[in-house]
Image (tube, rainbow, N blue to C red):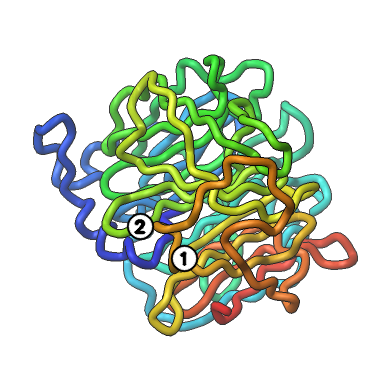
């Protein structure tokens, strides 16, 4: 999951000069990074920040890397990538069969238009972590980590029992990297706001939600996907959980060691796992586009989110904020905004292979 919100396009530029604790930080994020080789134990969630810097979540190491991709030249091509059986092409590049790799996440560099994938080369905990870059013509290449400029921060209280859930999603906005996952705290579901350039990650904020379909409060269910989005001038996390509550959380409440209750604004159907989400503008209005494993791709208008009534009692599926199912989109497992008019999708075909497709935003 990325810097996903259309209204934040200017924030990526404004984020070139950060303030941390009231002190002016480095003018350039890239200048704050040091040359070396990131030793990734796993490659999970991805997000882009300013200047072509890629944030990579490493759940197995409970660490996050900021990596200079040196991919900061504006695109000269208007090509829209479309690659059939991209998993087989990546497998051939890595010397394995496509079925022997797993694609964890996808993010588009908003400067160059190149697409990055986090990939496990092989299966199981010993699988090697690989970053793949796909250019606008659809050609994949391995992004070499040796000798890059990077920084790293550790999540010291990340869950040990469910290590893959230590980092479930990343998003950059307004000089901070927002990180969802599970901790070993009492409120295991955790959101962290980490200053960029990196400072040490704190304990994060424990998140409690009311799950209408389950009819109870929950603190141990991780956020599966989220976007950072301005609601009436206040930055919020719009988060989707398994089974599928949609929750609004003001980032002003994210303080180390605190416990916060999010506002459940919709129940989008139980027995369903949200996979990825973006926000975009079309016809002067903003929408969420949410991919799910059982309920297809939902288009959700953001109008009225600020006034949405909180769900605090047991609720039937399809309660609260309404949506439209985009029936033409099937098998979508990952998505990101490609530009202001298009989204790029990772789609599982009927034969099991993965296709890379670019579509007009619905």
Residue visible at 43% across and 84% down?
A: 283
Residue visible at 20% across and 51% down?
A: 16
The quarter of the picture where residue 65 lies is top left
Picture disc at residue 92: none
In-front residue for pair 147/347: 347
Residue visible at 43% across and 43% down?
A: 249
Judge whether residue 319 can be spotted in this image: yes
In the picture as drawn, the residue positioned furthest to the right comes out as 351
In-front residue for pair 273/164: 273
Q: Picture coordinates of residue 214 (x, y %)? A: 73, 38
Q: Where 80 falls versus 213 (above or below)?
A: below
Where does label 1 land, which residue? 302
Q: Where 226 falls versus 233 (above or below)?
A: above
Picture disc at residue 231: 2
The quarter of the picture where residue 323 lies is bottom right
Mark 2 lies on a secondary structure that is strand
Q: Is residue 191 left or right of residue 221?
A: left
Q: Marks 1 and 2, Cα distance to the nearest angstrom?
A: 9 Å
């Amino acid at each position: 999951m990325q810097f996903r919100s259309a209204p934040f396009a200017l924030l990526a530029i404004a984020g070139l000069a950060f303030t941390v604790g009231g002190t002016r930080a480095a003018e350039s994020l890239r200048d704050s990074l040091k040359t070396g080789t990131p030793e990734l134990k796993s490659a999970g969630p991805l997000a882009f920040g300013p200047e072509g810097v890629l944030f990579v979540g490493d759940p197995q190491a409970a660490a996050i890397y900021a990596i200079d991709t040196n991919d900061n030249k504006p695109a000269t091509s208007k090509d829209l990538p479309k690659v059939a059986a991209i998993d087989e092409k990546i497998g051939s590049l890595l010397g394995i069969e496509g079925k022997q790799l797993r694609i964890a996440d996808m993010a588009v560099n908003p400067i160059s238009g190149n697409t990055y994938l986090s990939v496990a080369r092989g299966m199981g905990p010993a699988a090697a972590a690989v970053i793949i870059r796909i250019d606008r013509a659809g050609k994949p290449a391995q992004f070499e980590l040796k000798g890059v400029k990077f920084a790293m921060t550790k999540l010291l209280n990340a869950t040990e029992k469910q290590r893959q859930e230590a980092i479930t999603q990343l998003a950059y906005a307004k000089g901070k990297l927002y990180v969802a996952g599970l901790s070993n705290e009492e409120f295991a579901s955790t959101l962290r706001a980490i200053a960029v350039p990196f400072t040490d990650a704190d304990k994060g904020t424990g998140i409690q939600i009311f799950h209408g379909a389950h009819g109870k409060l929950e603190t141990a269910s991780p956020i599966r996907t989220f976007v950072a989005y301005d609601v009436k001038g206040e930055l919020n996390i719009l988060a989707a959980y398994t089974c599928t509550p949609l929750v609004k959380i003001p980032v002003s409440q994210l303080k180390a060691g605190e416990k916060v209750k999010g506002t459940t604004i919709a129940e989008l159907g139980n027995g369903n796992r949200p996979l990825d989400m973006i926000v975009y503008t079309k016809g002067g209005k903003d929408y969420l586009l949410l991919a799910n494993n059982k309920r297809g791709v939902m288009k959700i208008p953001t109008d009225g989110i600020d006034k949405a009534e909180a769900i605090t009692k047991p609720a039937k599926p399809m309660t609260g904020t309404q949506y439209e199912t985009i029936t033409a989109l099937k098998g979508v497992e990952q998505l990101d905004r490609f530009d202001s008019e298009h989204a790029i999708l990772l789609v599982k075909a009927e034969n099991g292979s993965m296709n890379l497709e670019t579509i007009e935003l619905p």
